[in-house]
Image (cartoon, helix red, strand yellow):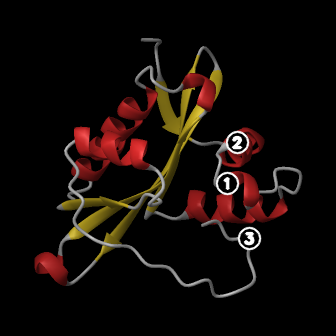
């Protein structure tokens, strides 16, 4: 397995991160890597929030993966803090060599260090390989997810 560095994303990583999102079969229909302005706005909001971490996985000096981790305070579960993992992507050319596992291990350690009681994530229903991956990491398929699009946006099935 190659040496994998997980670190906070920097603004100069943004074109590569958007490229990762667009390289995904579902992201290809909704991401526009040639228009970085909306992504810059989102990056700034995420990067300045104490409740979020946008991270990258780097190997041999190349960003090959990304994940976003958000921390949500709730009343349920006795007021527990929970971590929400979003947008875990590994470039297709770098899958199957442990990068996703390393990234998820990193997110779990971050959540534990913050005192989270629960870690949650969503995964598109068509991503059965990803579901198997998360199950191998100890996640249970406990909920059904729903979404409502609030404005005109590219949608994927």
Q: Is residue 2 left or right of residue 61?
A: left
Residue bearing the label numbered 3? 154
Rendered-image quadrant of the N terminus: top left
Mark linked to residue 109: none
Q: Are marks 3 and 1 in contact (CB under 8 Å)?
A: no
Label 3: element kind: loop
Residue bearing the label numbered 1? 27
Quadrant assignment, res 142: bottom left
Residue bearing the label numbered 2? 23
Label 1: element kind: helix
User: Looking at the picture, how far across and down is residue 62, in whole percent?
Assistant: 65, 23
Q: Residue at x 47, y 32 (%)?
A: 6
Q: Mark 1 packing: few (<14 Cα in 10 Å), some, or many (20+)?
A: some
Give the Cα separation between the discs numbered 2 and 1: 7 Å
How many labels sit on residues? 3
Q: Residue at x 23, y 51 (%)?
A: 139
Give the Cα separation between the discs numbered 2 and 3: 15 Å
Q: Residue at x 26, y 79 (%)?
A: 74
Q: Is residue 18 left or right of residue 53?
A: right
Q: Mark 2 packing: few (<14 Cα in 10 Å), some, or many (20+)?
A: some
């Amino acid at each position: 397995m190659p040496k994998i560095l997980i670190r906070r994303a920097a603004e100069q990583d943004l074109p590569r991160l958007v490229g990762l999102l667009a390289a995904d079969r579902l992201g290809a229909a909704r991401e526009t890597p040639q228009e970085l302005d909306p992504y810059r706005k989102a990056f700034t909001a995420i990067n300045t929030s104490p409740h979020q971490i946008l991270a990258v996985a780097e190997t041999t000096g190349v960003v090959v993966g990304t994940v976003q981790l958000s921390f949500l305070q709730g009343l349920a579960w006795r007021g527990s803090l929970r971590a929400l993992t979003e947008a875990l992507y590994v470039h297709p050319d770098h899958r199957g060599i442990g990068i996703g596992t390393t990234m998820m291990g990193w997110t779990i350690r971050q959540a534990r260090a913050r005192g989270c009681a629960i870690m949650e994530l969503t995964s598109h229903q068509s991503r059965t390989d990803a579901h198997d991956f998360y199950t191998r990491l100890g996640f249970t398929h406990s909920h059904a997810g729903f979404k409502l699009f609030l404005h005109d946006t590219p949608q994927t099935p």
